[in-house]
């Protein structure tokens, strides 16, 4: 008996393939691990950058400045080693949506500030739409993991 | 092969765990840091978003004409060693790199000056502008830049003090 696969099934099968899933995990996790390091090293600078986004009241700036890079690191590590891949991908994707919203809000307000994306350097400034597009691209592997990762066989074999 | 499935509670729970873990790690790192950040106190905003101040620029002629008695004070933003090797006559050394130590003893003199003109090694250095910004933040508003700086001064063959 021959089973005929629809094209959506085929696409799902390709997207769920272990090598592609592993690649997505490495890319997304790696990006976030890399992005977290400089911010972990310079929490004070990162707090100033968050303050410059002018979204949170000043007294609420420190906590996210301390926690956010560590959340990025933890979720990125989980993703790379294959622990709770869907959860970590979901978390990192939500963070990306948050970043895009923050960048978008300030682009609309006409505030230009350093991004704080990959470093705490003041020179880390880029056109907001470039950053949003970059975040959208980073979102792709996240979505592939969230929707197509198999629940079992979580770990890299 | 299942169709794409939305992540359920099973996926959300570890996610919350990661958020809590990150928060705790961040707080712990701050607790053990050499200089812990105050958790709920407002931080001073700094960096590129703060001052959009524009300083007017002056040329060598203006600097030459602003000798003693004019009320204009020349500020050399370069390192102290560079100042000792040669500077524009009448200039006071206020190295940007040692601003915190160098500023207080000069503060009174700076506040009494009618005009402050900052310069550094040449048109491509930013120390004079950065120095002017630091002074601006401390309430000094009558600031000018001699953008040509030492390079322009030397090119014109003007005298130096040592």
Image (cartoon, rainbow, N blue to C red):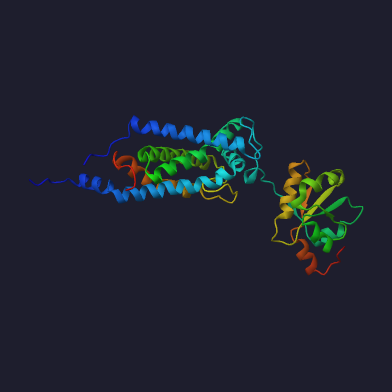
Residue A90: x %, y % from top left: 38, 38
Q: Nearer the viewer, residue B50 or A1?
A: A1
Residue A131: x %, y % from top left: 48, 48
Q: Which of A62 and B89 is in front in this view?
A: A62
Which quadrant of the structure image shows residue B50? top right
Say if residue B86 shows up in the picture.
Answer: no
In the rendered image, the quadrant that contains the N terminus of chain B is top left
Which quadrant of the structure image shows residue B42? top right
At horizontal 89% and vertical 57% (from top left) the residue drawn is: B67
* Residue that extends furthest to the right in the rendered view of this protein: B69
Q: Which of A77 and A86 is in front in this view?
A: A77
At horizontal 71% and vertical 61% (from top left) the residue drawn is: B123
From the viewer's perspective, is B62 left or right of A32? right
Q: Is residue A91 above or below residue B121?
A: above
From the viewer's perspective, is B40 left or right of A83? right
From the viewer's perspective, is B115 left or right of B129? right
Q: How many marks?
A: 0
Residue A97: x %, y % from top left: 43, 39
Residue B117: x %, y % from top left: 80, 53
Q: Which of B36 and B107 is in front in this view?
A: B36
Q: Is residue B32 above or below residue B53?
A: above
């Amino acid at each position: 008996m021959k089973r005929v696969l629809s094209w959506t099934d085929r696409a799902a099968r390709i997207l769920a393939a272990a090598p592609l899933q592993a690649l997505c995990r490495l890319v997304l996790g790696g990006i976030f691990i890399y992005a977290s390091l400089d911010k972990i090293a310079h929490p004070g600078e990162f707090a100033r950058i968050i303050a410059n986004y002018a979204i949170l009241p000043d007294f609420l700036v420190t906590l996210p400045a301390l926690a956010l890079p560590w959340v990025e690191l933890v979720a990125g590590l989980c993703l790379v080693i294959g622990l709770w891949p869907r959860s970590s991908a979901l978390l990192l994707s939500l963070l990306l949506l948050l970043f895009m919203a923050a960048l978008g809000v300030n682009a609309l307000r006409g505030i230009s500030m350093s991004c704080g994306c990959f470093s705490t350097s003041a020179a880390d400034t880029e056109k907001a739409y470039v950053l949003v597009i970059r975040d959208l691209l980073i979102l792709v592997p996240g979505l592939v993991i969230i929707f197509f990762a198999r629940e079992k066989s979580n770990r890299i074999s | 092969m299942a169709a794409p499935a939305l992540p359920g509670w099973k996926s959300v729970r570890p996610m919350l765990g990661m958020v809590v873990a990150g928060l705790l790690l961040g707080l712990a790192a701050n607790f053990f840091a050499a200089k812990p950040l105050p958790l709920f106190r407002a931080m001073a905003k700094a960096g590129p978003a703060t001052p959009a101040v524009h300083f007017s620029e002056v040329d060598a002629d203006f600097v030459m004409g602003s000798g003693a008695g004019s009320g204009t004070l020349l500020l050399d933003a370069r390192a102290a060693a560079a100042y000792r090797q040669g500077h524009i006559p009448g200039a006071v050394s206020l190295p940007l790199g040692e601003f915190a130590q160098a500023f207080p003893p000069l503060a009174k003199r700076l506040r009494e000056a009618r005009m402050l003109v900052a310069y550094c090694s040449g048109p491509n250095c930013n120390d004079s502008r950065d120095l002017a910004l630091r002074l601006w933040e401390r309430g000094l508003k009558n600031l000018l830049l001699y953008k040509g700086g030492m390079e322009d001064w030397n090119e014109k063959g003007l005298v130096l003090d040592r």
